[in-house]
Amino acid sequence: KAGVTQTPRYLIKTRGQQVTLSCSPISGHRSVSWYQQTPGQGLQFLFEYFSETQRNKGNFPGRFSGRQFSNSRSEMNVSTLELGDSALYLCASSLVWGGNTEAFFGQGTRLTVV
Amino acid sequence: QKEVEQNSGPLSVPEGAIASLNCTYSDRGSQSFFWYRQYSGKSPELIMFIYSNGDKEDGRFTAQLNKASQYVSLLIRDSQPSDSATYLCAVNNQGAQKLVFGQGTRLTINP
C-alpha cells in the first residue's frame, strides 16, 4: 500500500514568488492536514481538509491557502513568499475526520526562500 | 504555558536500558495522544497512539496515559542505537484532525 506522496521534495523560490505544493494521501484516506516544521517553532498546524472542505485552520496568515480535490488529493499554496516561509512542509493523511484516528506523514517538501 | 510540553533533551541512554520520554498537555479536552519518531532530515513516523487511560504496549514500546494528571509517556525497552532520534508527542483536541505537537525530545542511545 503506497504511503503519503508529496511533491516536489525540494523547492527554491525567491521572495515575492508563490508556490504550490501537492499531497496525495494514502489510498482510501479522506482527511489531509498540512503542517509547517521549522527549527524554531517546531511542527505547527496549517489547515485540514475533509471531503473537499476546510475543517480547521491554524494561526497562519492568509497567504497560506489550500484546497482538496474530489479524489482527496490536496494542494497548498503560499503567495508572496517571505524568507521566514523557509521550512519543511508536511502533509498528513487520515482515514476519517475527527475522533480517534491516526495521521501518517509524507516525506515533506523542503522549501527554501532566498 | 505551551499546550504540549516535552523535555527537549538531549536524553542519553545506554544501549539495552529503558528510555523514558515524558509529555504534559494543557487542554483537558484532549482525546487522543500520539508518539512520533523523527530521524534527522526525515519526516515524523507514527510509532504509538493511545486513547484511554493506562498502558498500551507494542513490542519494545509502551505508551502510558494519565488524563487526570494530563501526562503521557513513552517507554522504550532494550534501547538500540537505531532508536536514536527525536521523539515528538502530539495531542489531538477539538475532536478534529488538528495535532498539537511538543518541541520533541532528542534521544541518543549509546552503544
Image (tube, rainbow, N blue to C red):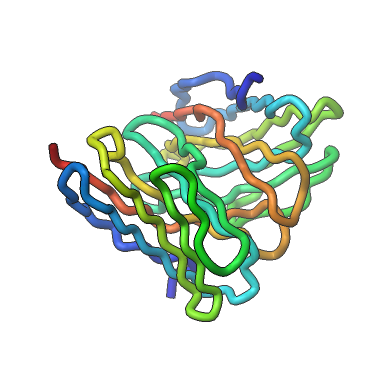
Q: Is residue A68 left or right of residue A83?
A: right
Residue A59 can be seen, yes or no? yes
Residue B92 locus on image (x, y percent)? 61, 59
**Can you say whether B107 is above or below A112 in the image?**
below
Residue in the picture at 55% in, 60% down: B91
- Image quarter for residue B37? top left
Q: Quadrant of residue A86?
A: top left
The residue positioned 41% from the left and 39% from the top of the image is: A83
**The C terminus of chain A lies in quadrant:** top left
Visible in this render: residue B100?
no
Percent x, y of residue B93: 64, 64
For the image, the number of numbered tags is 0
Coordinates of residue A7 in the picture (x, y in percent): 58, 20
Is residue A61 toward the left or the right of residue B72 in the image? right
Residue lying furthest bottom? B68
Give the x, y percent position of residue A1.
66, 20
Q: Is residue B91 above or below residue A64?
A: below
Determine the residue positioned at 59% across, 29% down: A18
Residue found 77% across the figure and 51% down from its top: A55
